[in-house]
């Protein structure tokens, strides 16, 4: 390719300044990709740059409006944790309400993170990049990812002066410790996910999700003097094949031993137990979130919604694996991000596991395909293929705990979320045409 290679796996690629930090030499603005155990650095082809669709109108009362990218960043915000403590306490006092009630003012105080240093593992992923856009104008974001999935390239986030990207792996404990140093918040999104990927690589799934989570917890423990919060991602799959109106205290299940699909749920459940242990025994301010089928603009990797939309926009048939009677509750990504923001700031979240999902958006897979076919005007048919692996038949959360503790509830219902998501994929397809 004629591109320089950075031989140190932990080398930091600063996308905003266009330099490889591992050796200190300046380069033009570049894009990184993993290649034969090294980091290949090359310019981004113009055709790779995807246009972002206009920000969709938010629901009344929603706090998920993204800050103006051109807004001036307050350069005074990057102060030490002690200097910020007074302001944080004042925010908490102003946002205090009686137990069980949560006003709009409370939520505003809860998401007013400013001047923080936030480490984001899996920082090039779908949820992580959506969250980073909400935080980057007022905080220093340090993202790390091995780019197995890349939702970052070609976005405006990569060029933001407060955003630094490091290509690396959560299996590298020394790198995690280095990047976590001085962090006020750690958000651990990195994991092996997706049914097909998990079934193909169960050993890798266990290694990354178990050892990677341990490494992040150890790195967070090493910076506990500055650490205010750690979010660890678990999964709704800890509830097994049948999960209706499940609360956080419901019995979890590990699935059938020998079925590769369940290595994901087992590894994530173990990570959740580790996060709670580090909180109870070592005082780490950790919170675990259990996402229920998150979707939306920017989604990469697997998932029924992405597969259906891409097929529909291509005029192809929508393929359902199984009989389509499987039921899922779909959570729009902006709602997920709102919950994460509250978990980052609200003290009530510490030590908790929280279901995050939208029970109002529960439909069968067949109904989901029909909705997407209708919303896209797809001429293709809905067809069925055999299912050759264990599947989840029913998954609907109870999110009362998040509502009671944090004042959070989902706002975007399924058709509206699908319309926004379809618009993003349509714009993306036009940009790459």
Image (cartoon, rainbow, N blue to C red):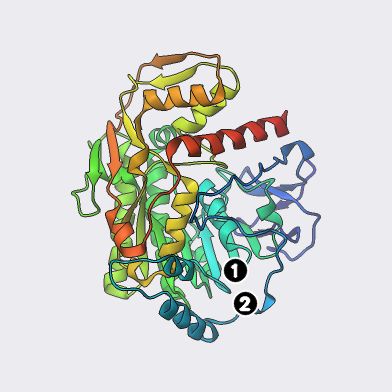
| Residue 391 spot, x, y in % from top left | 31, 30
Marks 1,2: beta carbons within 8 A: yes
**Residue 354, relative to residue 98: is it above or below?**
above
Q: Which of 89 and 230 is in front in this view?
A: 89
Quadrant the C terminus occupies: top right
Q: Which of 246 and 371 is in front in this view?
A: 371
Task: Say the numbered circle drawn on residue 77.
Answer: 2
Q: Is residue 363 visible?
A: yes
Quadrant the N terminus occupies: top right
Q: Determine whether the residue tagged by mark 1 lies in a helix, strand or loop.
A: loop
Task: Say the numbered circle drawn on residue 139.
Answer: 1
The quarter holding residue 276 reads bottom left
**Which of marks 2 and 1 precedes in the sequence?**
2
| Residue 18 spot, x, y in % from top left | 76, 58
**Residue 370, relative to residue 220: is it above or below?**
above
Q: Can residue 190 be seen in this view?
A: no
Q: Determine whether the residue tagged by mark 2 lies in a helix, strand or loop.
A: helix
Residue ID at (72%, 41%): 49
């Amino acid at each position: 390719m004629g591109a320089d290679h950075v031989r140190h796996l932990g080398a930091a690629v600063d996308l905003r300044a266009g330099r490889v930090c591992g050796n200190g030499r300046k380069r033009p603005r570049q894009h990184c990709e993993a290649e034969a155990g090294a980091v290949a650095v090359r310019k981004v082809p113009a055709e790779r740059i995807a246009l972002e669709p206009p920000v969709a109108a938010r629901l009344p009362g929603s706090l998920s409006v993204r800050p103006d990218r051109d807004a001036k960043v307050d350069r005074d915000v990057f102060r030490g944790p002690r200097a910020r403590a007074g302001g944080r306490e004042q925010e908490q006092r102003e946002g205090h309400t009686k137990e069980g009630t949560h006003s709009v003012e409370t939520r505003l105080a809860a998401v007013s993170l400013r001047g923080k240093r936030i480490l984001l593992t899996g920082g090039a992923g779908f949820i992580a990049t959506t969250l980073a856009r909400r935080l980057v104008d007022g905080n220093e974001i340090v993202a790390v990812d091995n780019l197995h999935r890349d939702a970052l390239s070609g976005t405006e986030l990569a060029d933001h002066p407060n955003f630094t990207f490091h290509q690396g792996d959560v299996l590298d404990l020394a790198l995690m410790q280095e990047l976590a140093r001085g962090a006020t918040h750690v958000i651990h999104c990195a994991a092996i996910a997706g049914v097909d990927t998990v079934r193909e690589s169960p050993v890798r799934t266990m290694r990354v999700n178990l050892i990677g989570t341990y490494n992040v917890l150890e790195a967070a423990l090493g910076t506990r003097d500055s650490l205010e919060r750690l979010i660890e991602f678990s999964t709704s799959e800890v509830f097994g094949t049948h999960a209706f109106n499940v609360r956080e205290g419901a019995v979890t299940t590990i699935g059938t031993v020998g079925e590769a699909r369940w290595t994901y749920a087992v590894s994530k459940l173990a990570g959740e137990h580790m996060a709670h242990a580090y909180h109870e025994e070592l005082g780490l301010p950790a919170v675990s979130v259990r996402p229920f089928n998150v979707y939306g603009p920017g989604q990469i990797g697997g998932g029924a919604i992405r597969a259906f939309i891409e097929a529909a926009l291509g005029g192809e048939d929508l393929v359902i694996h199984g009989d389509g009677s499987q039921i899922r509750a779909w959570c729009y990504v902006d709602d997920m991000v709102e919950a994460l923001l509250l978990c980052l700031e609200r003290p009530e979240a510490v030590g908790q596991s929280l279901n995050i999902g939208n029970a109002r958006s529960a439909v069968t897979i067949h109904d989901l395909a029909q909705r997407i076919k209708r919303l896209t005007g797809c001429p293709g048919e809905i067809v069925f293929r055999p299912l050759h692996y264990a599947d989840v038949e029913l998954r609907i959360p109870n999110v009362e705990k998040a509502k009671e503790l944090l004042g959070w509830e989902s706002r975007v219902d399924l058709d509206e979320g699908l319309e926004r998501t379809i618009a993003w994929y349509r714009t993306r397809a036009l940009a790459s045409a």
